[in-house]
Structure formats: C-alpha cells, structure tokens
Amino acid sequence: MLDETATATGAITLTRVAKVFGAFTAVENIDLTIRGNEFFTLLGPSGCGKTTILRMLAGFETPTRGEIFLDGTEIARLGPNRRPVNTVFQSYALFPHLTVAQNIGFALKMLGKPRAEIAGTVDRMLDLVQLQGRGDQLVTRLSGGQQQRVALARALAPRPRVLLLDEPLSALDQKLRKTMQIELKRMQRETGITFVFVTHDQEEALTMSDRIAVLSNGALQQVGTPHEIYNHPASRFVADFIGETNLLTGKVLRHDGDSVCVALPGGAQIKARSRHVLPAGAEVTLAVRPENCALAGPEAPLQGRVREVVYFGTDTHFHLDLATGTPLVVRRQNAAGAGPAPQEGDTVGVTLAPGGTSVLRD
Amino acid sequence: MAQSLPELESALRRADIRRRWWLSLPAMLVVLAAGIGPLLIVVVYSFLESGPYGDVVWKFSTEGWFNVLLSRDIFDDTVSLADAHLAILWRSVRLSAITTLLCLVVGFPTAWYMASRGPKARGLLLLLITVPFWTNLLIRTFAIQQLLRAEGLVNVVLMKLGLVSAPLQLLYTDFAILVGMTYVYLPLMVLPLYSTMEKFDFRLMEAAYDLYASRRRALTGVLIPLVKPGVIAGCTLVFIPCLGTYVIPRVLGGGTNLMIGNLIELQFGAGRNWPLGAALSIALVALVLVGLVIFQRNDRSGGDHA
C-alpha cells in the first residue's frame, strides 16, 4: 500500500478563504499553498484560526468565502466523507465500542473494500505504528500513547492524499511527545502523504516541519521554512511568538542590496536583512536572537551593563541594559574555554552577528 | 496465639461482610416489607379457592392458575384454552410493543436534538419534557379522549379540511390506546436516551464522516451501538408499564378493548374472583421479568460485541 511511486499528490491551494461565525471572523482572506508530500505546520496561539482552517480542509466547516483546491479540484463544498483527506483528532475520537483492528479498518470497511484486503492493510498499519499483536484489544484498554498511534493508523489506513493532525501530541507527556515528533516525521517520509499539522507549540513546529505558516487573529503572518521563520521573522508578532528575541529601534541610514544600514540611538551602526526597500530616515524595528549577540570588549559599538546572569547548563543568558535603556539578552554557550563570565554590574560590549539581524514589518 | 497473616485476613474479611449486612439491613427491611411481602400475599391468594359469593376460601387450590390460560366448560367439564384471556394477553403485548416502537421512533430524534443543543437550551428542553408529569395521568388521558372523540379537535379539523365527510371512529379503538400510551410514556423513552446521548462524544460522528461513512452508516455503525444502553433503558421503561397499564385502555379503549391491567381489575372488582386476579397479577410479573431478561440480554451482547 505504501507505494512510493509518488508523483507528489496532496497539494492544497487556498484562495481568499474566509470563515465567519456570526460576528466573529475566524479566518480572513487567506491565500496559502501547501505542496504535495510536505510536512506543513499551521502555528499560532489559541484562537488564531488554525483549527478552523484544518476543519475546512477536513470538510467539517464550509468556507464563508473563497475556494480550496486539492490537486486542482475544488473541494470546499464536498462533505468530509467525499474527500481523500483524513484527520487525527486532538482527542483521538477512537470508536470505544470497536477493537484496535476494527478502528483501523473502519474507513476501508466504509469504502466497501473486501475483507481480506482490509485485514492485510490493518496488519501493515499495526506494523507501521508498532502495535503488532494488539489488533484484538478494545481501544479503551490502551494507554494514551497507544491510542494516539491507533488514531494515526486509522487515519492513514485508507491512504489519504492529505493527513490532517489537530494538535495530536498535546495530551502526551514531554518524553513521549519528543519520540512521537520523530515518529511522525518518519511516517510522513515513509508514506509520502502530505501532513498538515496544527500546533501552538513553536518547538514542535520547528523540529518537524518542512514549512510553517504562522497565524494570528485569523490572518497569515508568515509562511516559510523553520529556518526562515526563526532567523528572519517578518513581523513583530512572529519574532515574539517564536523563540526569544531582542527588539531594537533605529533609523535607516542607507539601503544596500538586501540589507539596510541602521543607526541606533547612541550612534552604533548595524547591518540588518530587509525584504523591502526602505527610504533613508525611516524608523524601523530590528529583531536579533540572543544567540546572534556576542559579548565583546569596550571597542564594540554597543555597550551595556549586566543586570542579571542566568545559568542554563548548556548556555548562560546575560540580561543587559544598553546605554539607551533598551534591554538586551545575550546567550553564550558554556563550552570549555569560553572565558571568564562577566558578573552582574559589569559593563560589557556587544556585537551582533552579521546576517542575524532582521528588519521587522510592523 | 499469634495468628498467621492469611487467617487474619480472612477474619477481617468476615468482619467486613458482617458489617455490610448490618449496614444494608434497613434497606433490606424496606424491600421486604414493601416489595417481597405484598407479592407473597398475592402469591398466597392465587392458590386459594374463590367462594360462591365472591369471597376467598382458605383452601389450597390451583383453580386460579388454571383459569389464567384455560377454561373448563361449566356443563361438560371439557378443558379449552381461555380465548378471551389469550386475546387480552396478546393485545397487551402487541400494543405495548407497538407503543415502545413509536416512542423510540419519536423519542430518538427528540433526544438527539436535545443533546446537540447548547447547555442552556438543553436545560429548558429537559424541563419541557417533564412538564406533562405535572398533570395527573387521568386528566391527561381524558384530554386525549376530548381530542379524539367524534366532535373532538382531530375530527373537526379533518372535516373542515374536507379530508373526511363523517367523523372517524377514533375513540375506543386500539389506535386511541396507542396514542394515549405513546403520549404518556414518551418522556420515559426520551430521558434515558437523552442521558446517554448527552455523554456521547459528537466528535465520533465527525470521525465517522471523515472516515468515509455515510450519514446512515455513521448512525448504525457508531451512534446506535454507543447509545444502546439508553435505547434499552428507554424500551424497558416504556414496555413494562405499558403491559400493566390500566387507566389508558379503560378511558380510551372504552371497556371493550381490555388489556391485562383491566382484566386483573375486573377479577378484583365486578368478577369477584380474587384468586384468578392474583394469579393474573403474578403472571404479569412473570411476563415483565421475561421482558427484562430479553432486554438485558440484548444489552449484554451489545457490551461484549466487538
């Protein structure tokens, strides 16, 4: 069943999709393309519209406006039982009156597949999710992690073109979640099915996804690879939501290719990446990750006072107050030979890694 | 003197069992006094002889039980089946079964509708379902009689609409009894159905649709098996009181369409045959028990089924 002949199928295009519940706009005018065979994540805080998008892809909700295409076919108004898309529910929604095997074989039975074929597929699915020999158990007897695997196998069994996952790992403990993240990624690669994964956990999104869409208040904030999203956040929201970020304000001095030179209050000049051409004199906000800041000597352009030193084992965070009063966090790895650490109250210099600083669109 | 651990354990267990008996004693006494006691009296009466003036003679006799299903010809003592009793028995079972089915057909969508509303609307709907209980059963039954009689609302409307030229004979038919019983016992079907459906996880229906089930397959494959305990409880609560119902066939069946309840009343009243009445009562209890066993069997097979 898991034939890897795969010309990539399972490509989804949303064009100007909106969903309005009464007076509440859950999703507004989203244009989004999800490629075939992609591990795509919808990331955002609760209420950002990510689950609504997933439910529209599944067919549980119909968009108020706009179209959804699956491999070129418009599916927005097809019922959930008439599109080759299956869902792994947050609560798993396993049928409590059926065994593991009957749960996994449910879709195939509904599709009218012959008994022998169903049995064969169920066995392969049990192998895939490593639940060999558990087929005859009632699902209510399984642990949370095992139920999760059954839910996954049940949704994969009919071999959908797209698998939708609605925060499936949120009920698992930390350790199991880490294992399942790797497992999910492996299954996605093995099956070649497009996975659309919904989560509010940025770390989960960064580790598993080929691409991520960050959402806020029903609107897309940024779509890109984990690397792009993390290192070059497009907006203040993305910079703030994902990881820790230092924000600095300054004025554009000049534009230079895909970067700009920004003057910070206090006179320091910094090069930053910018997607847009900005006029000289424009006020901008810069984002720079703590690991892209480094402690330096008194010759460095930025100077600050150490307010707090926090030791994390693998690295240490230095919370500084710059001369202008702006707070800044510097992360330093605790490798052997890292040199003596500054103490609270010391004055230190800071350099920002070239290419590690982005101009935000507010 | 030291007791071994197993001995100590079993001694403790015995003490525990003794304590439980004492604690359950008041409940047992109530069951004995209010349930088993009266029933035993009825059993005793069913084995007595009925006197010539409708009194009860303290002499052992199986005549009462004999007369439940059989009758002896008063002239030549030939024994034949008691056709009248059998007809009434059959009507009781048949009308009760049809009523149960009608209640299920009407009650299932009603309960589903209620369970799928918001919490506020649910409370209101639940209240509305119980409103009929505020009125006496007799009054409600007479109200149905008013609706169904020749000059009643139903016939008037039918004639105004030109659907019938003369009033239909609705009252004093099995139909009238069915209407009455369905109306009266419907809440007893809706309430247990609602309570299981309320606990039902509606996402399971979404999961079924998502896995290519049609509406019908989702209903028969997921919803019905999972709310089966409610269906069985509802059917039990409707079928069993229907079997013994007395007022409804009396008022709406017009004294000609009898059910077991009326037959029993007849023996204790006008018929003056208490032993037969007692035997019929016990026969009804037996019938109810058979019904319960059948329903419970179904429930159990639903539980193991997998």
Image: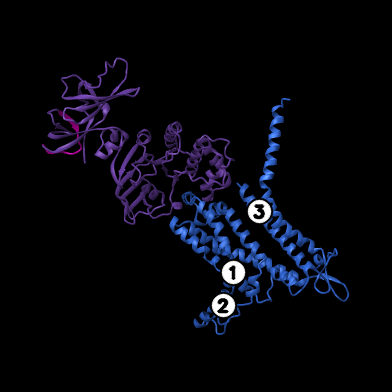
Chain colours: A purple, B blue
| Residues tagged by mark 2 and mark 3 found on one chain of the structure | yes
Q: Nearer the viewer, residue A245 or A4?
A: A245
Residue A359 shown left or right of residue B6 in the figure:
left
- Quarter assignment of residue A62: bottom left
Asked if one can make out residue A267 in the rendered structure from this viewpoint, the answer is yes
Above or below: residue B71 compared with residue B116:
below
* Subunit ID for the residue under disc 1: B
Q: Nearer the viewer, residue B202 or A256?
A: B202
Q: Secondary structure at mark 3?
A: helix
What is the x, y in percent for residue A291? Answer: 27, 26
In primary-sequence order, the first of circles 2 and 1 is 1
Q: Which residue is mark 2?
A: B146
Above or below: residue B284 compared with residue B155:
above
What is the x, y in percent for residue B130? Answer: 53, 63
What is the x, y in percent for residue A269? Answer: 14, 28
Q: CA distance from mark 3 to mark 1?
A: 29 Å
Q: Residues within 10 Å of mark 2 (few under 14, many from 20)?
A: some
Q: Check if residue B306 falls in the magenta segment.
A: no
Span colored in magenta? A269-280
The residue type indicated by label 3 comes to Gln
